[in-house]
Image (cartoon, rainbow, N blue to C red):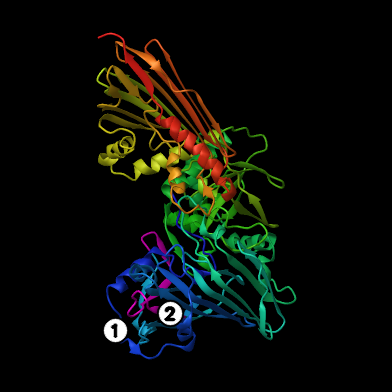
């Protein structure tokens, strides 16, 4: 599934210390090239103190443990902020060096890095030190992303199992919005975590706890508070789990001058946040003669409003390349529509801006919606700049009736608005990418922002219909002619897969799919339909021969009516391990999938037994199958439907039982008996 690059900066970049793939790649490179000039006997007292930490016996055998993780945040009256971050790890296994053998710190023109040091303490007590001058500095830009984001990466000397490694940096910041997010739980256990906040006299603060019980702060001095936590369990990675931000414990912190300064109160409410972003974007929403001319050309001869809207949205998705240029406030503020049009490129907020201006030329209003591509990380009770993407809400005419515009919502002030993502090239008008569904977005208007829940599109909008005719011969060989039709999210996934493959390699994708269900087969034909007609149903047709598909025993043949397709039974692997699963299961989207198979039976054979009809239900999905026979043809039909995408932990036993029933049904066989020689 397409996951978009972030094109809307989240403010607390110091929390994203090693999440970038580029930073990780540089870190691995540093592991292969030891830093020079490691000094001895120079570890600070705070790191030496961790040597005596007694660790419990961890059941999950982690590769490393965070012994100490402290943020000291000092805020000045002029809104400048100094952050001192100290971290200490104990490396428990040799492979820990690949994830925790280096320190990586992100920075940009607004977040100056004034100091970076790192140390290692070996089990025999010998100490080594390196400093910022030994670090490798790299840009975090790529082929489609240009920004002032950079990183310094520093390898710990002697980063071997049994060693304690640590680093400390000091960073000067002047953020656009005064808020913090202290993520104190990690993928490995944390022995001690600490957050210290020093505010100027008369400043105020507020905190919100997420996925962790509220803790009261300790007062260290005048307007200085500290929160300290110990023995935090690891957030273990599990397949199909929700985003880490919805699972891991973290603390949201806001601080602001007393007296209601607007600069310090941007995130006091969703309305305020919307007002701030509305003011930031208005100078970009200006048309040009070239834009007007292009709109006229694209919509000429199209009589209906939806047709005109579709012409503009297709142009935005297909012709305006994704290129992000984010310097300073450019991480939040879009470039002007005229510049985006002239350059024929832009990031998500740029594409949304140009499309909004083009829609205005045909009398259609559109509004920014700022969102996050991780479902559930935006909390209604905590106004925050935790967003990484921008889409549009297109206001529809009141008298418009268009049944296939599934992403339409009713706004109390604007009436019907259609949500549309100009950046995702595979999701056509009327649909919403699955990763944005059932999640919150901030609708930006002149009067401020309104947070709303984006819809979970119905299962009927995300369909797979697989029909097939098969012929079975007396030797048990099966020939098949299969037609798959998809729309909605399944079509998006299929198009992305085939368009990203070289034409000569596309048959291999079909063969890879077939190999999951057939032991011996030959693909004899394959073709695609409507591959680049994104508003049309996607088609995949293929033929194959499978030798020995039906197993034999004497004069009996055993044939599985469910020839192809699996309905999520692979998720049973999530329950196969000895330890119980900790976190919910998150499906990508609501969907309905149907298989309709006809199997012509070999001459001289009669049906001796059929699988029983199957009906299974749970709170999140339904499944049914039925096998019949008439006139020498086995008719198999089944329907699988997901209605809700989030399965909470307490409901995991129910989903396991449901999937086990499906797995048993998928393996059931019809029995054929030879009645004539």
Residue at coordinates 42% horizontally, 48% vertically from top-left?
319
Q: Residues within 10 Å of mark 2 (few under 14, many from 20)?
A: many
Please state which of residues 298 and 430 is positioned toward the viewer in this rendering. 430
Residue 634 in sight from this viewpoint: yes
Q: Which residue is mark 1?
A: 36
Please state which of residues 306 and 501 is positioned toward the viewer in this rendering. 501
Please state which of residues 674 and 74 is positioned toward the viewer in this rendering. 674
Q: Which residues are magenta?
A: 142-168
Task: Tell me the quadrant of the picture where the C terminus can be found.
Answer: top left
> Which structural element holds mark 1?
loop
The numbered dot on residue 166 is: 2
Q: Position of residue 656 (x, y in %)?
A: 51, 42
Indicate the quadrant where residue 132 lies: bottom left
Residue at coordinates 31% horizontally, 10% vertically from top-left?
675
Residue 537 in sight from this viewpoint: no
> Which structural element holds mark 2?
strand
Q: Position of residue 451 (x, y in %)?
A: 66, 54
């Amino acid at each position: 599934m397409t996951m978009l690059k972030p094109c809307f900066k989240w403010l607390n970049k110091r929390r994203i210390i090693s999440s970038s793939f580029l930073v990780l790649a540089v870190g691995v490179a540093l592991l292969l090239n030891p830093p020079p000039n490691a000094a001895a006997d120079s570890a600070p007292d705070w790191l030496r103190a961790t040597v005596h930490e007694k660790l419990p016996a961890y059941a999950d055998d982690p590769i490393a443990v965070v012994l100490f993780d402290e943020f000291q945040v000092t805020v000045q009256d002029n809104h400048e902020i100094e952050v001192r971050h100290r971290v200490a790890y104990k490396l428990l296994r040799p492979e820990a060096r690949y994830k925790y053998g280096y320190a990586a710190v992100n920075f940009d023109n607004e977040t100056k890095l004034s100091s970076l040091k790192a140390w290692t303490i070996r089990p025999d007590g010998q100490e080594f030190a390196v400093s910022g001058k030994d670090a490798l500095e790299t840009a975090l830009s790529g082929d489609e992303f240009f920004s002032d984001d950079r990183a310094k990466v520093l390898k710990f000397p002697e980063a071997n199992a049994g060693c304690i490694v640590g680093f400390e940096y000091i960073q000067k910041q002047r953020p656009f919005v005064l808020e913090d997010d202290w993520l104190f739980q990690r993928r490995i256990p944390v022995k001690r975590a600490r957050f210290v906040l020093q505010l100027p006299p008369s400043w105020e603060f507020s905190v919100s706890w997420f996925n962790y019980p509220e803790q009261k702060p300790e007062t260290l001095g005048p307007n200085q508070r500290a929160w300290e936590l110990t023995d935090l369990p690891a957030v273990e990675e599990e397949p199909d789990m929700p985003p880490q931000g919805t699972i891991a414990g973290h603390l949201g912190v806001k601080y602001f001058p007393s007296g209601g300064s607007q600069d310090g109160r941007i995130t006091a409410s969703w309305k305020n946040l919307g007002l701030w972003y509305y003011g930031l974007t208005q100078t970009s929403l200006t048309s040009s003669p070239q834009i007007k001319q292009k709109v006229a050309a694209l919509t000429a001869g199209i009589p209906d409003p939806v047709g005109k809207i579709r012409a503009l949205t297709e142009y935005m998705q297909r012709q305006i390349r994704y290129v992000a240029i984010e310097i300073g406030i450019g991480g939040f503020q879009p470039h002007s529509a005229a510049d985006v049009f002239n350059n024929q490129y832009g990031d998500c907020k740029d594409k949304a801006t140009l499309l909004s201006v083009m829609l205005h030329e045909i009398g259609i209003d559109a509004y920014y919606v700022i969102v996050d591509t991780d479902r559930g990380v935006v909390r209604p009770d905590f106004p925050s700049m935790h967003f990484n993407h921008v889409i549009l809400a297109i206001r529809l005419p009141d008298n418009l009736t268009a049944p296939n515009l599934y992403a339409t919502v009713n706004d109390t002030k604007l009436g019907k608005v259609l949500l549309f993502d100009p950046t995702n090239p595979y999701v056509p008008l009327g649909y919403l990418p699955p990763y944005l569904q059932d999640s919150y977005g901030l609708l930006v208007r002149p009067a401020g922002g309104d947070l709303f829940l984006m819809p979970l599109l119905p299962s009927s909008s995300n369909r797979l219909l697989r029909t097939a005719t098969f012929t079975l011969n007396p030797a048990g060989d099966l020939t098949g002619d299969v037609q798959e039709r998809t729309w909605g999210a399944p079509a998006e996934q299929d198009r992305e897969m085939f368009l990203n493959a070289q034409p000569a390699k596309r048959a291999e994708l079909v063969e890879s799919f077939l190999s999951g269900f057939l032991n011996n087969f030959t693909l004899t034909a394959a073709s695609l339909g409507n591959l680049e007609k994104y508003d049309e149903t996607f088609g995949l047709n293929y033929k194959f021969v499978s030798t020995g598909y039906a197993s034999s025993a004497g004069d009996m043949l055993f044939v599985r009516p469910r020839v192809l397709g699996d309905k999520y039974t692979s998720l049973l692997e999530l329950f196969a391990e000895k330890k119980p699963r900790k976190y919910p299961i998150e499906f990508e989207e609501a969907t309905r999938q149907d298989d309709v198979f006809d199997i012509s039976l070999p001459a001289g054979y009669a049906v001796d037994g059929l699988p029983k009809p199957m009906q299974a239900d749970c709170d999140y999905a339904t499944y049914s199958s039925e096998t019949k026979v008439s006139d020498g043809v086995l008719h198999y039909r089944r329907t699988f439907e997901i209605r809700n995408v989030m399965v909470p932990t307490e409901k995991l036993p129910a989903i396991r039982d449901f999937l086990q029933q499906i797995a048993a049904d998928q393996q059931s066989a019809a029995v054929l008996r030879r009645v004539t020689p």
